[in-house]
Image: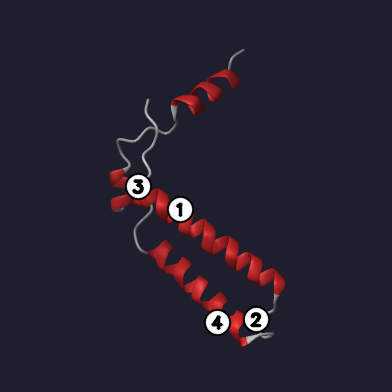
Amino acid sequence: MTNIPKDSHHEEIVKYNFFKAEYQKLSKQFTRDEDPLIKAKLDIIKRKIGEMLSDDCPLCGKRVINLIDQPFYTEEEYSTELEKWKI
């Protein structure tokens, strides 16, 4: 098995995780009504996350089709899982 290449799907996951973490951090630090700048930032991040999630069908979209020939595990992950299941 080979390592999964870093493609646009990987980059989108990284972006999504960044936006999610940033949104959670800002949400915990401030209430939406406290500061108009924070409210604007939260709204932008929420909109970007929504755009990313609604951009393509997670079951049959082009990202899933492009990943059809990619392995589920790297060789290292597979070996680790295999060791866990040995009796």
Residue 65: image x %, image y %?
28, 45
Question: Distance between the Cα atoms at labels 1 and 2?
Answer: 26 Å
The answer to which of 36 and 86 lies nearer the viewer is 36
Residue 66 relative to residue 50: left or right: left
Q: Which residue is mark 3?
A: 7
Quarter placement of the C terminus: top right
Image quarter of residue 75: top left
Q: Label 2 near label 1: C-beta < 8 Å? A: no
Q: Secondary structure at mark 1?
A: helix
Residue 25: image x %, image y %?
65, 66
Question: Distance between the Cα atoms at labels 2 and 4?
Answer: 9 Å
> At x 70% / y 69%, what residue is drawn?
28
Q: Secondary structure at mark 2?
A: loop
Amino acid at circle 1: Ile
Q: Nearer the viewer, mark 3 or mark 2?
A: 3
Q: Which residue is mark 2?
A: 32
Question: Distance between the Cα atoms at labels 3 and 1?
Answer: 10 Å
In the displayed structure, 17 sits above or below 30; it is above
> At x 31% / y 39%, what residue is drawn?
68
> At x 38% / y 32%, what residue is drawn?
71
Q: Earlier in the sequence, mark 3 or mark 2?
A: 3
Residue 49 relative to residue 56: left or right: right
Q: Nearer the viewer, mark 3 or mark 1?
A: 3
Q: Which residue is mark 1?
A: 13
Q: Is residue 73 visible?
A: yes
